[in-house]
Image (cartoon, rainbow, N blue to C red):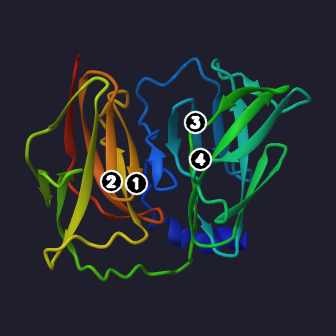
Amino acid sequence: MQYRTMLVALLLTITPLGACGGGEHDHHHDEHNGHNEDTRSDRLTITNPDTGDVWVVASEGHRHGEIPPVAEEQSLTIALNFADAEDNPLDLSANLHAELRFADGAPEDILELSLDDNLLTLTALKRGQTFFHVQLFEDDTLRFESPALVARVVTLGEEHVHDHGDISRVELVSADDAPIATIEGDAYSGAPLQLNVGDTLTVDVLYIGESGDPMEMGDHVVAPVLTDDAAEDVVDWTVDVERVTFTALSPGEVSVVLELDYFGMSMHTPAALPIVVNAD
């Protein structure tokens, strides 16, 4: 109870992200807003075991919501609830059991993960973020694996100090430093990103401070988030700190907000980036 009381003020400052997030600063986009859910997949629902409040709902390739951050020197217990594609509960039993694995490349020294039946306890080891998968096995066969789930350890009451000044604009450049677009305030200047189905495009996202120079990312990372009305099956992405690689999945038009993330807190939210995916 002491942990939940202390964390209330912090949670009010946290902006939920997609992330996707990510690895590991190199993670896959799997945060979606309710379109085209995979109805053939088993589902994982992560809840508060005391109140039943839902924190995360995940199926194969889709994730909604975030696990609350864990304060340093604290732990958090969450409940893992499984259901099949028809929403029939899948109770852990002799032939159904859950397992965990860290995502490829994710640090394993941020949190200790301890699983007891369907209760998972996350114990903070040091400040940072990592990513892990929840797996459901039927006998010895993997039946379901969740998308990568982000878990963060934060400092209670910590105030993030910007040494880069206020961000005046965001510049998008190609991997070879060719200008693509500029986002300043609520204005996007440039043509929409154009891709054909199956194409990939890598861009560097530069947050420009009052000095006119790109800020040093440090512990920051780009956190792409689809706008509320965007279909989630048009583009996917991976993130490596300030570098975002988009992959075109299907024809359509979407808008993506390139938020600046600092341990789960949104430090800057620019205007949305328009992306158009054309058929082959």
Report the amino acid beneath label 3. Ala
- Residue 122 image offset from top left, x and y in percent: 71, 59
* Callouts 2 and 1 close, C-beta under 8 Å: yes
212 to 196, vertically: above or below: below
The residue drawn where x is 33% and y is 43% is 245
Secondary structure of residue under mark 1: strand
- Residue with the mark numbered 3: 58
* Callouts 3 and 1 close, C-beta under 8 Å: no
The residue drawn where x is 56% and y is 77% is 156
Q: Residues within 10 Å of mark 2 (few under 14, many from 20)?
A: many
Report the amino acid beneath label 4. Asp
Tell which circle, 4 or 1, labels the residue nearer the N-terminal end. Answer: 4
Which residue is at the front of the view, 66 or 61?
61
- Residue with the mark numbered 4: 104
Which of discs 3 and 1 lies nearer the camera? The answer is 1
Which residue is at the front of the view, 166 or 50?
166
Residue 243 image label: 2
Q: CA distance from mark 4 to mark 1?
A: 14 Å
- Residue with the mark numbered 1: 240
Q: Residues within 10 Å of mark 4 (few under 14, many from 20)?
A: some
